[in-house]
Amino acid sequence: MTDTIAIDVQPVGTSRLANTDFSNLPFGKVFADHMFLADYRDGEWKNFRIVPYGKIPISPATPALHYGQSIFEGMKGFAGVNGDVLLFRPLDNLRRLNISAERMCMPLLPEDIFMEALTALVNLDRQWVPQVAGGSLYIRPFMFSADEYIGIRPSQDFTFMIINCPVGPYYSTPVRVKIETHYTRAVAGGTGFAKAGGNYGGAIYPAKLAQDKGYHQLIWTDGKNHEYIEESGTMNVMFVVDEVLVTPALSDSILAGITRDSVLALARHWGMKVEERKISVAELVNALEQGRVQEAFGAGTAATIAPIELIGHQGKDYPLPPVGERKFSNKVYNELDLIKRGHTADPFHWVVKI
Ligand SMILES: *Cc1c(COP(=O)(O)O)cnc(C)c1O
């Protein structure tokens, strides 16, 4: 961090803390007192401000509403000792935000603005970081086009914001997933590697069809021939087959998850064999039929590890071994939780203390 940005702070008159039940925090529905905003005007970021969380006026002609010129991030902060707040790999979220921004013709956000905004906001809402076991502050930075213009072109004006949600423990009930072989989330040359709004709106319908059939989520396959495994819902997907950790290699149709990267780093650190490569549906189904898939899970910020209990493919369901028997996913889940909360050594310097 080089300069210091001037942030105008307008604190709430009355905090909502006293009326918030920290023992009941449904994900994404409870918001901390304040939010951060910045405007991109005339080629630069300005008007840095923290204001009470609430509705924002936007023009009905905002391109974000019409054409999906919007990108977002998701990260977490944890209550450390002595009132510290521990952020997990925030600069990796910034790096990814800027990768998304480039793909969507949006301005890059400099590191000093991002980190100072995060620090000031989290400082002000420190008491919103849950102290309850398993709790965390879910942090949602996002950027959208703010031109007033009905037309498709690179925008000139943008808004960057951060809002925060205190969240309780995420009970990862094992999920039933269906390998999707008709609908597509992302294609080569598309925007799948960006955390861009439109990628998600289009994924709701196929997921709903699967939910109507008793599955929780989809495993997406490539958009060309639906031949290769890509992701699970909004998480990266990983398997342990014959004691080897296998996950699809990154591509422009797969989001480069920070949880994915962290899981791979720990597995390698522990000397486990790791393969990032193409995994065909045929290979996976074959391994499932032969009972060689020891573990399957989604990896993402919200759940960290979401164990998969069953995989459906073309009308046939393949159950997986009981979650209690899964050595690697249980171990990596626990280790990541300890690192994020500052309860154990952080060999990769992932945690940033505020
Ligand atoms: C956010 C996201 C992930 C997980 O990324 P994390 O950085 O681990 O939270 C995976 N896939 C998709 C499509 C995502 O949007």
Image (cartoon, rainbow, N blue to C red):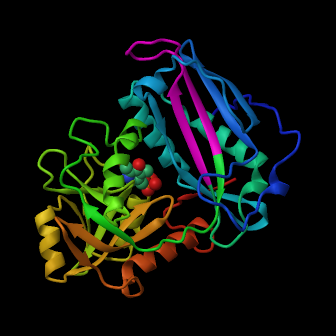
Q: Residue furthest bottom?
A: 325
Q: Position of residue 120 (x, y in %)?
A: 73, 42
| 277 shown above or below 90 | below
| 254 shown above or below 10 | below
Q: Relative to residue 82, is residue 183 drawn left or right? A: left
Write the residue at 18% across / 54% down: 181
Q: Is residue 15 magenta?
A: no
Which picture quadrant has residue 326?
A: bottom left
Write the residue at 41% across / 41% down: 195
| 1 shown above or below 228 | above
Q: Relative to residue 203, is residue 109 drawn left or right? A: right
Q: Position of residue 240 (x, y in %)?
A: 27, 75
**Span colored in magenta:** 138-163
Q: Position of residue 169 (x, y in %)?
A: 60, 69
| 281 shown above or below 191 | below
Q: Relative to residue 31, is residue 273 drawn left or right? A: left
- Name the quadrant of the N terminus: top right
Which picture quadrant has residue 119?
A: top right
Q: In front: 5, or 312? A: 312
Write the residue at 48% across / 48% down: 92
Q: Position of residue 116 (x, y in %)?
A: 67, 39
Q: Relative to residue 49, is residue 76 drawn left or right? A: left
Q: In front: 288, or 157? A: 288
Q: Is residue 140 magenta?
A: yes
